[in-house]
Every structure is written in structure tokens, then in C-alpha cells.
Amino acid sequence: MPTENKRSEPLKVERSTVTKLVITGAKALDPITVFLEDLAPRKGKITVSCRDKSWHAYWGGMWDGHTLAQFFCQLDEHYIIGYFSPSMGAMRFSNDTLMKLARKAVVDRRRMRKSYWEFSDILDNEDARDLFDQIEDLRNVESIMSAHRHGELLTDLFGAEWWRVVDEKAIELNPAWTYLCRIVTAVQQDLG
């Protein structure tokens, strides 16, 4: 049975001009597709796609007299990524770095070296070997949140505020961030 259209007003359709670019030849990147749409003075949106990922941003207060392309080219890549992927950080937790940091903590305490963790006692050979063996338990830690399951070991390694050391030192450059930075740079070069 057909449904009735209960709208009293007709649908409004607006047309706009969209610029589509396909960027090829960027070093170690698949083709990048860019859709730019200047909606009104100081307003525009952009969609950037590369391989199977897409990012979108809308600006409702661009600088006077700038098209979206001009505006986009003058922005810092970190600012753009903040729009494209607000939850992505330039750095991320690294289990490999945590493991190296833990081993270094044991070696430093055994050799009486000062580091960014402070302990008044040094480790004897047996305690150092025991701690070193326990470090293997950290192998499956995937985030600082999952590290809490190993709080006792991490306290023995880094002190009572171990999470500060892990949060500040057990990190690496986020490859997803680097990848998106390269895409943004390629788009800016092509638009500029």
C-alpha cells in the first residue's frame, strides 16, 4: 500500500559547484581524491580520500577573501588533522618502548645509575634477575590502561607513580598520524 507524503512543503534542492581533484604520483601514496566545495563566503568543506580511508572537514569561518583551497593551503597540518581525525594523536603507546624502558630501569638500578625514576636502593644480582625475568609479563600490554593489570611490577620498576613514566616515555610516533600528514602535505602542494 503506497504511503502518503505528509509534507505540506515541497522539498528544496540546492545546487552547488564541487571541485574534484585526483592527485597521483605522491611519493609512496596511492591516488588521493579531493572534493572541495565553497558553500558561501567564508564557508566551505573538503573531503580527502586515499585508498580505503576518507577524512572530512567543514569550516564556517574562513578568512575573508579566501577560497577553501587557499585557506586549506595556509593551515598547519596538525590543525587540519585535528579536524580530520580529532582523536588521533601524533604519538601512541609502544609496547616495544615499554619493554626497553623496563629493562633499562633494572640495569640502571643494578649499576647504581640515576635515571628519571628515583629509587634510593640498588638491586642485588638476584633481585635484578627476578625483575628482569618478570618484564616478559609486560609483552602483551597494549595501552597504558591495560598496563594497570601489572601495577605491582611497574611500581617495582618505575616507582609509585609508574603511570607517569609509562605515559611520557613508553611512546612512539604514530604511523597513522605520519601517513595523514603526508596526505595533507600532498594535497596542499597540489592546491598551492
Image (cartoon, rainbow, N blue to C red):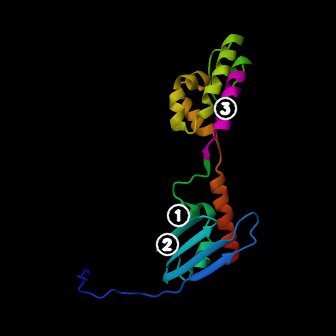
Residue type beneath disc 2: Trp
Mark sitting on residue 83: 1
**Bounds of the magenta span?**
92-108
Q: Is residue 190 above or below residue 181?
A: below
Q: Position of residue 69 (x, y in %)?
A: 60, 78
Among numbered discs 3 and 2, the one appearing first in the sequence: 2
Q: Is residue 148 visible?
A: yes
The kind of residue on which mark 1 rests is: Tyr
Tell me if residue 89 is in the magenta stretch.
no
Q: Main secondary structure of the magenta part?
A: helix
- 100 drawn magenta: yes
Q: Which mark is residue 53?
A: none
Residue at horizontal 56%, vertical 72%? 47
* Along the viewing direction, whichever of 160 and 49 lies nearer the viewer: 49
Q: Are marks 1 and 2 in contact (CB under 8 Å)?
A: yes
What's the mark number on residue 99?
3
- Please provide percent x and percent y for residue 18: 55, 83
Q: Alpha-carbon distance for marks 1 and 2?
A: 9 Å
Residue ID for mark 2: 59
- Left/right placement of residue 133 relative to residue 162 reads right
Secondary element type, mark 1 = helix
Q: Nearer the viewer, mark 3 or mark 1?
A: 3
- Where residue 7 sits, quadrant-wise, is bottom left
User: How far apart are the alpha carbons under marks 3 and 1?
Assistant: 33 Å
39 vs 33, left or right, is left
The residue depicted at 57 percent of the width and 26 percent of the height is 154
The foreground one among 23 and 177 is 23
